[in-house]
Image (tube, grey):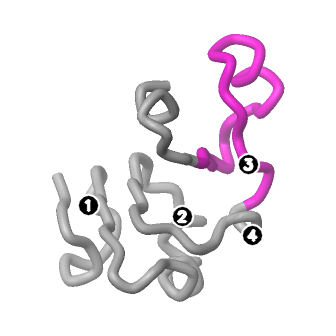
Amino acid sequence: RNMQNQSLESDIYDPWVDIKEAKKVYDIDCLETIAQTSGYDVVILATAHEEFKSNWDQIKKDLHNPSIVLDLKSCLPINESDFRL
């Protein structure tokens, strides 16, 4: 919500999230598929789902150049992110 208040656009995608429940409980809109994503300046990987790891090459192609990748679960190879926990 705070990013939206700052006029920043954000998208949320998680293959394990029930989209209707996320809307009802948290009042957030989630993307239905990762195919809906492209053209990002920043990506924050907050989960280590296999879908993100196995599709990383395609996801990376859809990022702006330059872009920032925050890997909060250290699921990508070390050279693939700008910051990792």
Q: Which residue appears at 77% of the width and 58% of the height?
A: 33
What x and y, as percent, mark residue 83?
Answer: 18, 62
Which is closer to the viewer, label 1 or label 4? 4
Label 4 – label 3 distance at C-alpha: 9 Å
Task: Compare marks 1 and 4 and give the one earlier in the sequence.
Answer: 4
Magenta stretch? Answer: 11-33
* Left or right of 23 on screen, residue 14: left
Which residue reaches farthest top?
A: 25
- Judging by the rendered image, the residue that carries numbered circle 3 is 31
Is residue 10 part of the magenta span, yes or no?
no
Amino acid at circle 3: Leu
Which residue reaches farthest front?
A: 7
What number of labels is visible? 4
- Assign the magenta stretch its main secondary structure: loop
**Mark linked to residue 35:** 4
Amino acid at circle 2: Glu
Amino acid at circle 1: Ser
Task: Compare marks 2 and 3 and give the one earlier in the sequence.
Answer: 3
Task: Compare marks 1 and 2 and give the one earlier in the sequence.
Answer: 2
Which is closer to the viewer, label 4 or label 2? 4
- Judging by the rendered image, the residue that carries numbered circle 1 is 74
Eyeballing the image, is 84 above or below 65? above
What x and y, as percent, mark residue 16?
Answer: 66, 42
Disc 3, SS: loop
- Judging by the rendered image, the residue that carries numbered circle 2 is 50
Label 2 – label 3 distance at C-alpha: 17 Å
Label 1 – label 4 distance at C-alpha: 23 Å
What x and y, as percent, mark residue 70?
Answer: 29, 59
* Left or right of 6 on screen, residue 19: right
Task: Compare marks 3 and 1 and give the one earlier in the sequence.
Answer: 3
Is residue 17 part of the magenta span, yes or no?
yes
Q: What is the crowding at mark 2: few (fewer than 14 residues within 10 Å), some, or many (at least 20)?
A: few
